Amino acid sequence: MDLTVREQARRAQAAAPSLQQTSAESRKQLLLALGFALRQQQAEILAVNEEEVKEQAGQGLSPALLDRLKLNPERMASMVDGIEQIANAPDVLGETITSWQQPNGLHIRQVRVPLGVIGIIYEARPNVTVDAAALALKSGNAVLLRGSRMAAKTNARLVATITETLQEHGLPSDLVQMVQDTSRQSVKEMAQARGLIDLIVPRGGADLIRTVIEIATVPVLETGVGNCHLFIDASAPLDMAVALALNAKCSRPAVCNAIETILLHQNWAEQHFAQLARALEEAGVELRLCPRLAQYAPNHKLASEEDWATEYLDLIVAIKQVADVEEAIEHIQRYGTRHSEGIVSLDEKNVARFFAAVDAACLYHNASTRFSDGYALGLGAEIGISTQKLHARGPTGVIGLTTYKYLVDGAGHIR
């Protein structure tokens, strides 16, 4: 019999103290064992995933979503590497963030503690199942995982490995649970399980994130919508600019840190737009051009107002010519989603101006926005890319899943 979301949340809440009472070394060994188990069971996991990808392809799932759903040995290896990075990272639970003594002799410590129960709502990326579980376990939290129907079989197989590992280490399987209901109703129930779930993290498209934010009574960590830009300044070297544009757009177009718009300084565009356009065309990218650039490439679509605001998650890119760094900043501030923005430039003043003025979680100078990832930045796996300002921002790992409490020592003090 399927459990309701609230019943699963109550079980998670009851299980959490057993994890919070473990030692740092125990949690490390638990995660290392999980990584080992995933390696040992890789063939079975990939077989389940391959069957599910074929099934979803037959039902007309888009290539972009199929790419998100698919696991392969490289992605499994990256997943396990992320777990091991988390396992070997310094443990933060019980850490004294700061301490001080009052003039009256009271001693105060601010100490890091788990949030309690985390709810993750995500779409077709089964790697999130493992990343979220590992981060939750490292940070002392129980977790409810609400994946999508299209990845249900793969997610269930991964959670089976996780719960087996928990039980082998004497911990309750309720610490990591897959929400059994994949209907929209379960999203609402999770988002409104105040008192049972301490934080909701939606990972997916703009509609999912907006829906969760609008209906939630549980605090929400806003993540992921990535209308990301690359500004190519007048001084940008041609080879570098083209390589960065290709990587940021084409290496995995269906992820949130891929660029959706390229902004070209007018002087750079006059000299190099044709080379950039040709390179993107050869990579299979569809171009949507502003009127000034469209006159040089009439075979491409004219960009609409909607294009500037669209997260394509596909091999499509909008390109606009701008007068200078100020116009680039103005465009990004108008259409960006405060995720990841890049500048290609050798002009230190323009780079400094870009970094100072653009409001985003991650800013890049002469580097691809594809590095907006906890693993790529050396943080291990992340729960998501937070595009908000409270309480965590950017790739959010273990620390973002903790809070703190004050411990006050006295000697019979009264007020």
Image: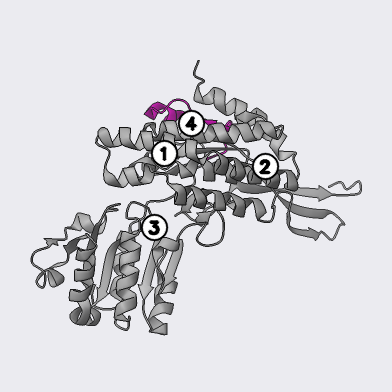
Q: Is residue 260 magenta?
A: no
Quickly name the residue at label 1: 212
What's the distance in space between the residues labelled 1 and 3, CA to CA? 21 Å
Q: Is residue 242 visible?
A: yes
Q: CA distance from mark 2 to mark 3?
A: 31 Å
The earlier-in-sequence mark between 2 and 4 is: 2
Q: Nearer the viewer, residue 397 or 324?
A: 397
Instruction: Specify whether residue 147 is in view.
Output: no
Label 4: element kind: helix
Q: Which numbered disc covers residue 257?
A: 3
In the displayed structure, does residue 302 sit left or right of residue 132?
A: left
Is residue 349 placed above or below 8 in the rendered structure?
below
Q: Position of residue 28 (x, y in %)?
A: 69, 47
Q: Secondary structure at mark 2?
A: helix
Q: CA distance from mark 2 to mark 1?
A: 32 Å
Type of residue at label 4?
Answer: Ala
- Mark 2 or 1 closer to N-term? 2
Please rate how many residues cluster around mark 3, counting C-alpha atoms within 10 Å: few if below 14, some from 14 to 19, many from 20. many
- Mark 2 and 3 residues: CB-CB less than 8 Å, in contact? no
For marks 4 and 3, the one nearer the N-term is 4
Q: Secondary structure at mark 1?
A: helix
Q: Position of residue 8 (x, y in %)?
A: 55, 26
Q: CA distance from mark 2 to mark 4?
A: 20 Å
> At 62% from the left edge and 29% from the top edge, which residue is drawn?
173
